[in-house]
Amino acid sequence: MEDSGPVGDAGSASVPPEAQSALVALVGGTGGAVALGAPLLPQAEALRDDSRLDSPLMRDDAARESVVAGVSGMSVVTDPMCVTYTWSGLSVNIAFASCTLEATGLPLDGMLGLAVSFAPIEIRMTFAALQVGDLSLDGMVGIRTGGGCPMGMDTCLNCRDTDPTCMEMRAPQQTIFADLTVALTEDFTITIMDGTVTHDAAGSAVSGIGMVTGGSLAGTFDAMALQWAMGQCLPSSGTLVYTPPTGAPITVTFLSTTPETGAVEVTLPPFPTTTQVLFTPCAM
């Protein structure tokens, strides 16, 4: 992608090309993970509270219903007719043909495997060469959701199935985790380590830390309240701090205009904050 360079104060530093590639991979990969995982949260929470989980004979049906409602019930994708399912127990192969991701508005094609587990509720997706917009994604994305312990964490010890380890099932959490390879001009591997995620009618948001590697590059990142408005391919608020292997951290702040312009505020010490076009604008 061509670097438009800074559009802010003269004498400021542009983001180096290798750092810009890492940022593009980070935002694209994180956006893909959020678009696949965050819309499943409402169904995962409904499954957590479903009384059928107490019955080994009924909980598989409850899990399958939740997955179908979450993926093709106007949630992960906009059109349920573009999705087909092949089930085996609590695992399913899901094929997407000319779909559109509801969260980011990007095209989605390919196949993934999805598995559901309990205590806590976890939905884990694995895939190879999953096409999300212009990016090809390999790897894994998962979400995990727990309940509440209003009387304190001790009360979580008395959980269904009399399993003392199911305290985690009842602990409040909305967690996303991922390990992705994003194919650009070179491959970048992105690891999101137990970030927090939210999803509602306004959009999806994620906060978390992780690592990004590609070629000789190996950096870390900290995503703080990155918010994708519904149907937008880029965040419209939030901050992403990328720390390269050498040199100062690069802080990128997303603006309400970022989806239509690709421009963000960049802080690269010791230079002043400037506005730079680092991303391809979303199709409007």
Image: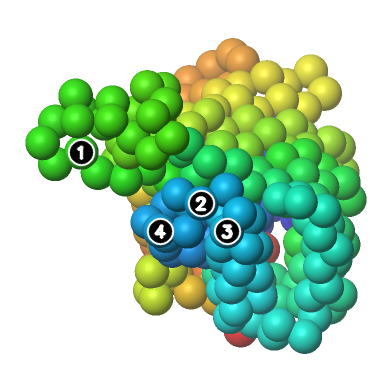
* Apparent side of residue 234 relative to residue 131 in the rendered image (left or right): left
- Asked if residue 277 is positioned above or below residue 222 in the image, the reply reads below
The tag on residue 58 is 3
State whether residue 242 is above or below residue 150. above
Q: Which image quarter is the N terminus in?
A: bottom right
Identify the image quadrant of the C terminus: bottom right
Q: Does residue 2 appear anywhere in the picture?
A: yes
CB-based contact (under 8 Å), mark 3 and mark 4: no
Question: What residue appears at the point 82 percent right and 23 percent down from the top-left corner?
Answer: 215
Single out the mark in the foreground, 4 or 1: 4
Q: Marks 2 and 4: which is nearer the front?
A: 2
Q: Position of residue 145 (x, y in %)?
A: 43, 45
| Disc sitting over residue 55 in the figure | 2
Measure the C-alpha gap from mark 3 to mark 4: 9 Å
Q: Secondary structure at mark 2?
A: loop
- Are the residues at dot 1 and dot 2 in contact (C-beta closer than 8 Å)? no
**Tag 2: amino acid:** Ser
Instruction: Name the colouring of the figure.
Output: rainbow
Q: Residues within 10 Å of mark 1 (few under 14, many from 20)?
A: some
Name the residue located 65 percent from the left edge and 70 percent from the top edge. Answer: 68
Q: Are marks 4 and 1 in contact (CB under 8 Å)?
A: no
Sequence-wise, the earlier of marks 3 and 4 is 4
Instruction: Label 3, secondary structure: give it.
Output: loop
At numbered mark 1, what does the secondary structure look like: helix, strand or loop?
Answer: loop
Q: Are marks 3 and 2 in contact (CB under 8 Å)?
A: yes
Q: Which residue is mark 4?
A: 51
Q: Find disc 1 in the rendering and name its residue.
A: 149
Query: Label 1, label 3: how many angstroms apart (C-alpha)?
Result: 25 Å
Question: Compared with residue 83, is residue 2 higher up or lower down, i.e. above or below?
Answer: above
Residue 41 locus on image (x, y percent): 47, 58
